[in-house]
Image (tube, rainbow, N blue to C red):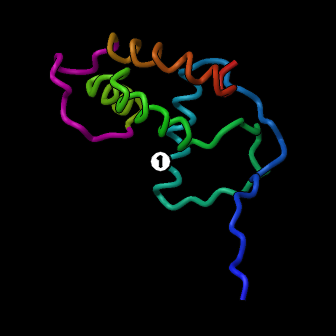
């Protein structure tokens, strides 16, 4: 018996509308990933606005940039804490959030997201 061919099928033929800002893309990714981890199921083509990627694509990009040492651990924590994605303890700067780290992390994300067509 011949083995089955396993291939990747495109989820949708629609290109999707890129995000207007990096903050919008990150918030969307965190909201989508949180919903998926909570058990929500997504069906392709039913979104109000089609996007050029999946939420985990953006989160995977953040971890890749961290592994490449383009994002520090503190910057990653600042991203995760901003949207309530993490229950982490204070990252050590001061009591509360360090928005300087958040701005730096978002600045690092801009170019890779534009190159992938996720950000306009």
- Residue 89 is left or right of residue 14, and the answer is left
Position of the C terminus, as image quadrant, is top right
Q: Residue furthest bottom?
A: 1
Q: Looking at the picture, how far across and down is residue 18, in whole percent?
A: 71, 26
Residue displayed at 39% across by 12% down = 104
- Residue 59 is left or right of residue 117, and the answer is left
**Which structural element holds mark 1?**
helix
Q: Residue furthest front?
A: 2
- Is the magenta region chiefly helix, strand or loop? loop
Between residue 18 and residue 71, name the one nearer to us: 71
Residue displayed at 30% across by 23% down = 72
Read off the magenta span: 85-99
Position of the N terminus, as image quadrant, is bottom right
Between residue 76 and residue 36, name the one nearer to us: 76
- For label 1, count other residues whose C-alpha is less than 10 Å away and answer few (under 14), some (14-19) or many (20+): some
Q: How many marks?
A: 1
- Residue 45 is left or right of residue 102, and the answer is right
Residue 50: name its quadrant: top right
Q: Looking at the picture, how far across and down is residue 114, in whole percent?
A: 63, 20
Residue 110: name its quadrant: top right
Q: Looking at the picture, how far across and down is residue 55, in whole percent?
A: 57, 42
- Residue 113 is left or right of residue 85, and the answer is right
Residue displayed at 52% across by 51% down = 35
Q: Which residue is mark 1?
A: 34
Q: Is residue 42 magenta?
A: no
Q: Looking at the picture, how far across and down is residue 54, in whole percent?
A: 62, 43
Q: Does 52 appear above or below 95? A: below
Residue displayed at 71% across by 36% down = 51
């Amino acid at each position: 018996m011949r083995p089955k061919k396993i291939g990747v099928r495109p989820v949708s033929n629609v290109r999707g509308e890129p995000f207007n800002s990096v903050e919008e893309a990150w918030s969307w990714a965190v909201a989508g990933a949180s919903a998926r981890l909570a058990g929500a199921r997504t069906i392709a083509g039913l979104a109000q606005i089609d996007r050029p990627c999946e939420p985990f694509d953006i989160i995977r990009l953040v971890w890749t940039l961290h592994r490449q040492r383009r994002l520090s651990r503190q910057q990653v924590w600042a991203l995760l804490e901003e949207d309530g994605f993490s229950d982490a303890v204070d990252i050590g700067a001061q009591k509360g959030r360090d928005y300087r780290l958040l701005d730096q992390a978002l600045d690092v994300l801009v170019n890779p997201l534009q190159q992938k067509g996720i950000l306009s």
